């Protein structure tokens, strides 16, 4: 937290962000946040708007790699005292009785407000891609590559979003691939599904096949110390960005994450026939291309034995 409390570091980091080749301006969020600060006094709010006391604290939750740190640096740069501004006061304490827990949560799953400030829209990726085409002498990333690999998240309003970190990584390094995390993607996914492997195998198989799975997503599960039920596990995976949620169902959002799920399944014999199918997927693809139905049947029988 120290970087955000009236120091100069946040301002310096945000200045670096602005200088990035593939920076997308999200400063319009200040137009919505500053009035909350100005009107937090109920009397002032009544005088200016005719309304009574409004929200004092808000919490905007988004998946990992969705630009939260950049937004936080930008807000701290604008409001912090570190570089002649109005000031963010430090947190003196936190407990279950602290006033800090009296906030209203704006999640991507349940609330439309603030959706445009996190993640990249199609229009924003279009603009970045045009910049990439002009700057890169030998462009190796296609616009469709970006859509296939990094699109697939959805807001409450139904708008589709891209993972910003991955889009920027692909354009900056002129290479499509996984930029989700620097290490341990398999371990991260398995951390969640291990608590209910037996019941989740079928659902994961369906999602890997492109079929959404019904789920009751609740935000509270993301901070639970014990994730036991499928709905709790799926809720946490949505909040952290491993899954997308829309119309009452969860799904694997794009190829970047699909590859991570496949990596996990290939390393877990306890996934039973799903594991065996993943291991045999290369042989099945070759047999399918050749029209070798005998080999295809043999692989399926072997994988589904004892199912």
Image (spheres, rainbow, N blue to C red):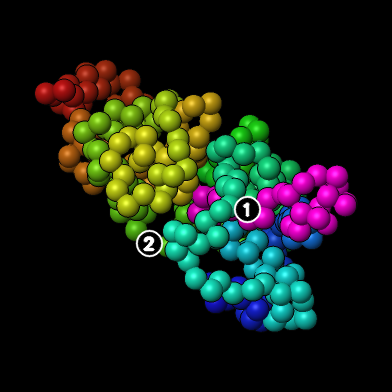
Residue appearing at x 62%, y 42% in the figure: 161
Instruction: Please tell me which residue lies in front, 144 or 126.
Output: 126
In the rendered view, would you say 270 is above or below 30?
above
Q: Is residue 123 left or right of residue 215?
A: right
On residue 116, the disc is none
Residue appearing at x 70%, y 61% in the figure: 23
Label 2 SS: loop
Residue appearing at x 63%, y 55% in the figure: 57
Magenta-tinted stretch: 40-65
Mark 2 lies on residue: 183
In the rendered structure, are the residues bearing label 1 and label 2 in contact, judged by CB atoms less than 8 Å apart?
Answer: no
Earlier residue among tags 1 and 2 = 1
Q: Is residue 15 visible?
A: no
Mark 1 lies on residue: 58
Task: Measuring from the top left, give residue 184's x and y in whole percent.
Answer: 34, 58
Alpha carbon of mark 1 to alpha carbon of mark 2: how far? 32 Å
Q: Is residue 273 left or right of residue 150?
A: left
Task: Measuring from the top left, give residue 222's x and y in whole percent.
Answer: 42, 48
Instruction: Please tell me which residue lies in front, 177 or 245.
Output: 245
Q: Is residue 297 left or right of residue 238?
A: left
């Amino acid at each position: 937290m120290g970087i955000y409390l009236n120091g100069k570091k946040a301002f310096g980091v945000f200045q670096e962000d602005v200088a990035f080749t593939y920076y997308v301006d999200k400063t319009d969020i200040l137009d919505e946040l500053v009035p909350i600060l100005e009107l937090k006094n109920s009397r002032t709010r009544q005088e200016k708007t005719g309304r009574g006391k409004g929200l004092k604290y808000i919490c905007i939750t988004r998946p990992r790699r969705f630009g939260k740190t950049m937004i936080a640096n930008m807000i701290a740069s604008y409001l912090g005292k570190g570089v002649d501004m109005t000031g963010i006061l430090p947190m003196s304490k936190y407990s279950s009785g602290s006033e800090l827990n009296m906030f209203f949560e704006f999640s991507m799953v349940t609330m439309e407000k603030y959706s445009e400030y996190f993640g990249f829209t199609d229009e924003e990726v279009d603009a970045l891609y045009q910049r990439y085409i002009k700057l890169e002498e030998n462009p190796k990333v296609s616009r469709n590559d970006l859509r296939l690999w990094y699109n697939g998240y959805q807001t409450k309003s139904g708008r589709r979003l891209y993972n910003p970190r991955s889009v920027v990584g692909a354009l900056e390094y002129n290479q499509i691939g996984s930029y989700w995390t620097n290490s341990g993607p398999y371990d991260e996914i398995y951390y969640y599904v291990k608590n209910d492997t037996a019941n989740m195998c079928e659902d994961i198989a369906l999602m890997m096949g492109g079929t959404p799975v019904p789920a009751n997503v609740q935000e509270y599960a993301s901070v639970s110390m014990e994730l036991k039920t499928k709905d709790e596990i799926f809720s946490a995976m949505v909040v952290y960005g491993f899954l997308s949620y829309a119309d009452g169902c969860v799904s694997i959002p794009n190829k970047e994450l699909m590859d991570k799920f496949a990596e996990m399944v290939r390393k877990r014999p306890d996934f039973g026939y799903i594991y065996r199918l993943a291991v045999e997927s290369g042989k099945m693809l070759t047999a399918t291309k050749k029209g070798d139905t005998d080999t295809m049947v043999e692989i399926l029988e072997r994988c589904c034995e004892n199912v």
